[in-house]
Image (cartoon, helix red, strand yellow):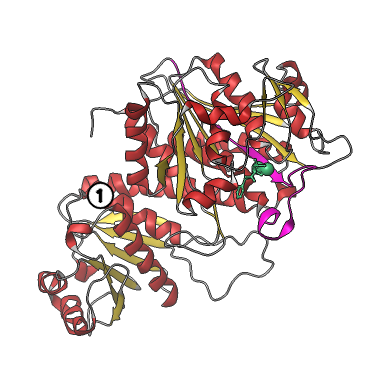
């Protein structure tokens, strides 16, 4: 999809569909302001239009260059935020598909947001809702029309609208990269293949990639990753991505760790298929989020030193699979008693987090589809965020929560009191890899806390990473959750005083 910005008069836009988002009670005034054939058509149609969020109405100007005009509601003016803009743009995109429009113009509405945020949000909503995964379809979907050209109609603030549109496009495309990876069939993303894919992305977007093979992982004594990998026919990899621009403001990196279980059968603690194993190709969604974020950061040329780290393997019950009762010696030297081979994510993440100490990082994020308990607690639209409960905790979380709000990748914090760690006491090793049934996402985070000694933010995104049915601008399947969250956080972190 080509995205551009124009300041031509609305009457002069030669497009199949012109989308005009308006807030509740503002439509009449907007129609009058537009005037000409477009304004007249709009005005006539408004007898059937309230302006509720995502409400759409199609009208046909008697003359003029735009073939069709869709008015899209934004809801009450005081509630128009980035999310409302994304949703309205998504409703507009659906109208474009319905009318088979290939050239579309989208007007920037007035609101309390600046043109940059408005342009970004509209482009994100439009592009993300137009996504369809068709890699494995032998015949193209003929019902479907793809927008070839999207033109944003900016008012006075053309320059910032252009900046926003460009950022929205890059963040949407990086999110789509992550969606594609999650939706990929497991045999097309074995750890080795995933490493090759990321090497290709690194060359394309200009970040460095190094893929460690099994012998490298053995040299690092990563007992967690190697333990999980034992039941698999495919060797594990560790993928390291580096973005280090010469103008980076930090000498110690921001590190992003993503869980890369390319398929989770549960191992010998085998999962039942229905509603459990059937979507476990998505168990590398944390890795996909990190890969997408590295793409966005590089393409936006963010002046920050950032490292992405992905431990990747599948979790299978092969001949030599690790078994309940096995004790693993981890990269950190700590020993872990495995009591459930399905609690594998924390084992591979622990090794990556422990390795990350060597970078002397400023801050480390890990993103993981870690626990079913997260889905039970928060559902499929909000991920859990956890951090060590020290004196810096709220200060650390604040910009993360702000990035969540801006991006629409929503987060809610979970408590991390010391007593939760008691559930991980083992009779034979330093700790065990599962707690009891209570507070499963928190005990998983408490497990990981043993392997970090730096400022750390853990995001359990089991629910929001993959959808069985669509949400606004998120079709069913991989969502790309986390890409825009991380990108917004990092952009802000690189320019702390700009906002
Ligand atoms: N990958 C799963 C978690 C998951 C569940 C992700 C649902 C997405 C949707 C993880 O490896 C897992 O199996 N966790 C276990 C841990 C338990 C054995 C302590 C779980 O949550 O049941
Ligand atoms: Mn599992
Ligand atoms: Zn898993």
Q: Residue furthest right?
A: 319
Left or right for 290, reference 325: left
x and y percentages locating residue 427 in the rendered image: 72, 23
Q: Is residue 271 magenta?
A: yes
**x, y percentage for residue 476?**
54, 61
Which picture quadrant has residue 96? bottom left
Which residue is depicted at the point 39% across and 61% down? 149
Query: Is 105 displayed left or right of 27 in the figure?
Result: right
Ligand 1 found in image quarter: top right
The quarter of the displayed image where residue 395 is located? top left
Give the position of the C terminus as an image quadrant.
top left
Check disc 1 and report the residue beneath it: 161
- Residue 14 at least partly seen: no
Residue 222 coordinates in the image, percent (x, y): 70, 22
* Residue depicted at 15% across the width and 71% down the height: 25
In the rendered image, residue 299, in percent from the top left (x then y), is placed at 44, 37
Instruction: Give me the residue at 40% from left, 22% from top.
Output: 390
Q: Magenta segment range?
A: 252-278
């Amino acid at each position: 999809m080509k995205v551009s910005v124009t300041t031509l008069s609305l009457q002069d836009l030669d497009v199949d569909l012109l989308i005009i988002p308006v807030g509740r009670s503002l439509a009449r005034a907007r129609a009058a302001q537009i005037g000409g054939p477009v304004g007249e058509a709009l005005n006539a149609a408004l007898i059937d239009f309230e302006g509720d969020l995502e409400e759409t109405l199609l009208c046909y100007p008697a003359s003029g260059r735009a073939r069709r005009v869709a008015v899209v509601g934004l809801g009450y003016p005081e509630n128009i935020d980035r999310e409302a803009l994304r949703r309205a743009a998504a409703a507009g995109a659906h109208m474009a598909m319905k009318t088979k429009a290939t050239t579309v113009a989208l007007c920037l509405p007035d609101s309390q947001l600046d043109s940059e945020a408005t342009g970004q949000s509209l482009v994100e909503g439009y592009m993300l809702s137009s996504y369809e995964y068709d890699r494995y379809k032998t015949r193209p979907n003929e019902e479907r029309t793809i927008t070839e050209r999207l033109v944003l109609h900016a008012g006075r603030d053309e320059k910032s609208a252009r900046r926003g549109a460009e950022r929205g496009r890059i963040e949407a495309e990086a999110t789509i990269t992550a969606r594609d990876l999650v939706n990929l069939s497991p045999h097309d993303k074995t750890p080795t293949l995933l490493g090759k894919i990321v090497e290709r992305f690194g060359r394309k977007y200009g970040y460095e990639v190094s893929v460690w093979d099994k012998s490298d992982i053995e040299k690092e004594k990563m007992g967690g990753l190697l333990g999980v990998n034992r039941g698999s026919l495919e060797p594990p990899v560790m993928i390291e991505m580096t973005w280090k621009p010469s103008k980076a403001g930090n000498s110690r990196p921001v590190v992003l760790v993503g869980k890369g279980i390319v398929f989770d059968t549960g191992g010998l603690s085998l999962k039942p298929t229905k509603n459990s194993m059937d979507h476990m190709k998505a168990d590398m969604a944390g890795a996909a989020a990190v890969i997408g974020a590295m793409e966005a950061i590089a393409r936006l040329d963010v002046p920050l030193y950032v490292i992405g780290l992905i431990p990747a393997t599948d979790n299978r019950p092969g001949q030599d699979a690790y078994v309940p009762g096995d004790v693993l010696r981890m990269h950190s030297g700590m020993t872990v008693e495995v009591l459930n081979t399905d609690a594998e994510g924390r084992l591979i993440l622990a090794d990556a987090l422990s390795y990350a100490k060597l970078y002397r990082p400023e801050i480390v994020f890990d993103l993981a589809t870690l626990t079913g308990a997260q889905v039970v607690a928060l559902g499929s639209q909000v991920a859990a965020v956890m951090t060590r409960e020290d004196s810096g905790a709220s200060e650390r979380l604040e910009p993360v929560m702000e990035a969540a709000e801006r991006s629409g990748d929503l987060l809610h914090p979970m408590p991390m009191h010391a007593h939760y760690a008691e559930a991980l006491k083992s009779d034979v090793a330093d700790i065990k890899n599962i707690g009891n049934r209570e507070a499963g996402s928190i005990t998983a985070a408490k497990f990981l806390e043993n392997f970090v000694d730096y400022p750390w933010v853990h995001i359990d995104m089991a629910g929001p990473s993959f959808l069985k049915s669509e949400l606004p601008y998120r079709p069913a399947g991989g969502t790309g959750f986390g890409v825009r969250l991380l990108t917004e956080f990092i952009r802000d972190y690189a320019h702390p005083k700009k906002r």
